[in-house]
Image: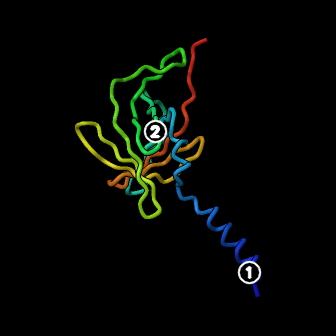
Amino acid sequence: MISRLTFLLLMLLLVACNGAVQPEDISKINGYWEIEKVILPDGNTKDYKINTTIDYFKIEGEKGFRKKVMPQVDGKYLDAGTSEKVSVSFQDGDAFLYYDSGYAKWKEKIISISDQELVFKNDNNLEYHYKKPVPFTIK
């Protein structure tokens, strides 16, 4: 027979390993992210070896923006001139980003967030995997 303490510890461990995105995780989105791959609905993967633009996120609380920037040879980024308003919403244990570009509106479910990886899934069942970019320089 399992003691109550053992049962509580097991339940706490299961909850901790759940992996659900929490409100305090949202701040990890802030910064520069480079698309690494997209997993298509049929399971095929499209890899991105070189990216001419990088996504920059800035979210405070439940509101913010995402803009496209272009990496430069000196390691800095140049604003590409496109951005979307972003809002965060939690529904039924899931976290979503809602985008508004002024021309279109869409949402993406946040699948996972860490310091080095970010995964979103959109309504078309496309799963976007991002990684932190490594700035390049010419020496």
Q: Residue furthest top?
A: 139
Give the quadrant of residue 133: top right
For the residue pair 8 and 137, the one nearer the viewer reads as 8
Q: Colour mode?
A: rainbow
Label count reads 2
Can you identify the residue that label 1 sits on? 4
Which residue is depicted at the point 55% across and 35% down?
132
For the residue pair 35 and 99, the one nearer the viewer reads as 99
Give the quadrant of residue 68: top left
- Residue 1 image position (x, y, % from top left): 76, 88
Residue 116 is marked as none
Amino acid found under the numbered disc labelled 2? Ile
Please state if 38 lies on the left or on the right of 12 as rendered. Answer: left
Vertical order, 130 against 138 (above or below): below
Can you identify the residue that label 2 sits on? 59
For the residue pair 81 and 42, the one nearer the viewer reads as 81
Please state if 77 lies on the left or on the right of 41 as rendered. Answer: right
Which residue is depicted at the point 36% across and 51% down?
122
- Residue 103 image position (x, y, % from top left): 22, 37
Vertical order, 17 against 54 (above or below): below
